[in-house]
Image (tube, helix red, strand yellow):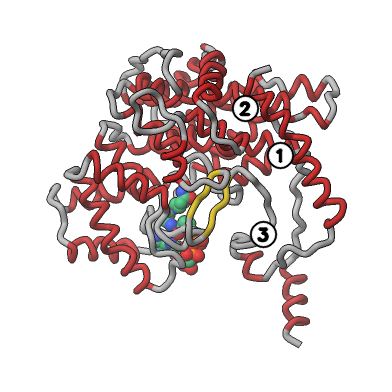
Amino acid sequence: MSKLKQKLQDKIPEYRERVGNLIKNHGQVKVDEVKMFQIYGGMRGLKSLTTDISYLDPEEGIRFRGYTIPECLEKMPKPPGAEMPYVEGHFYLLLTGEIPTQEDIQSVVEEFSGRSKVPEYVFDVLRAMPKEAHPMSLFTAAITSLQRESLFVPAYNSGISKMDYWDPTYEDSINLLAKLPEIAAFIYRLKYKNDDQIGSDPSLDFGANFAHMMGIDAPYDEISRLYFMLHSDHESGNVSAHTTHLVGTALSDAYFSFAAGMCGLSGPLHGLANQEVLRWVQGVMEKMDHKIPSKEEMKKFVWDTLNSGQVIPGFGHAVLRKTDPRYAAQREFCLKHLPDDEIFKIVNLLYEVVPDILVEQGKAKNPWPNVDAQSGVIQWHYGVTQYDFYTVMFGVGRALGVLSNLIWDRAVGQSLERPKSLTTDMLEKIAREASK
Ligand code: HAX
């Protein structure tokens, strides 16, 4: 058994006891109550999920297993000479809750590289897809085609005990995760580089191997590590995480569950917002004939978008009420490495003008930028100008968090998710009685 799996196995009994105690001895304790606006308003703020992988405080932003982004960047071991930590180490942290040693990381790097070979039939499926298919359509197709590799399915069919479900889910999750960088890079080069593929180099870490297969030189390896880590998790209520969890509770295997989550990530209000930001910025640049707009000109572009009934992509959030620390971490990278980049200047200008305008418009509860406002700038700067690919990279990162969550769901025996619906008549009756 690998060191990582052993560590997980050692931790499971204590968690099961804690969860068992909550259900058995405190099962009737009220945690929250549902209000009418939440039923119609996307269950915003309703405390009805649990995860230990990460926690999103509205004012502070994300903590991964209790650590802020700056703490993760500082504390986590890095490849020799690198600025950004290992992706494999971040996965270790998400899964176990502990900061890994170099030795711990090395064994995860080896575990991943030993499982990274993508079967040829996945490439055949991708090559058979229509040329104009969106990269996220290719990404989800690759994941579902891999589903035949699931070890959970035969284990379940052979009557494995519920207590052991986490084990083949762990195997499926690592097998899938290890292949995602190659699948993503393959999609990129298939769609935008005439299918001129660059083979995987299993001696490289997750981030560096992705950069190598994309065909982009340093510091793109650093960017890849940062990007995958920042996008890994945002507690379990966001669409991609919640969908992966929800589908997983039906005991769909990790491939089906994650593919479902990726379909959710493909929405413009969620992961697709990163491509929308670049599309919007490109529209501005075309209208300005590639001249950086003045503050007044930019304000007009923003108002025009709002007045036409569209949202400003990359701004606002369902939970956060301040600037997203994932935005801030990427902005810091830009200030250090690409301060004079044309698109960075435009995105900075947006940071200066959009919040005030959203406040003046008076609709958005959070006028501040989110992760997606900044991520495309860095990609564009290093040559990934095909912005409809950005969500695929988001998806590779998101896998680290949602698959960790799925393994823990199985370990603690999370139940089938099945909330109760009411009809409009019933809600109107409840409203009438409440106003008596
Ligand atoms: N531009 C214009 N209007 C906005 C807005 C924005 N950036 N953000 C919110 N609003 C509007 C909403 O559309 C809503 O309008 P209606 O009352 O007319 O429906 C109103 O303000 C209240 O919305 P809210 O409560 O502040 O925000 P929600 O929780 O409903 O939605 C969203 C959160 C992220 C979907 C929203 O802020 C948005 O659409 N932002 C732009 C898209 C985006 O950047 N998405 C990525 C978010 C981060 C993420 O998940 N990444 O994957």
Quarter assignment of residue 71? top left
Q: Is mark 3 within 8 Å of ligand 1?
A: no
Question: Is residue 222 toward the left or the right of residue 15 in the image?
Answer: left
Q: Could you tell me how far apart the alpha carbons at marks 1 and 3 are, in whole angstroms?
A: 17 Å
Q: Nearer the viewer, residue 69 or 393?
A: 69
| Local SS, label 1 | helix
Q: Which residue is mark 3?
A: 47
| Residue at (45, 19) in percent of width and height | 127
Quarter placement of the N terminus: top right
Which numbered tag is attached to residue 173? 2
Q: Nearer the viewer, residue 433 or 348?
A: 348
| Local SS, label 3 | loop
Which numbered tag is attached to residue 280? none
Question: Is residue 290 toward the left or the right of residue 199 in the image?
Answer: left
> Is residue 278 shown above or below 140?
below
Which numbered tag is attached to residue 409? 1
| Residue at (25, 54) in percent of width and height | 348
Quarter assignment of residue 132? top left
Residue 83 position, x and y percent, is: 34, 32
Sooner in the amino-acid sequence: mark 2 or mark 3:
3
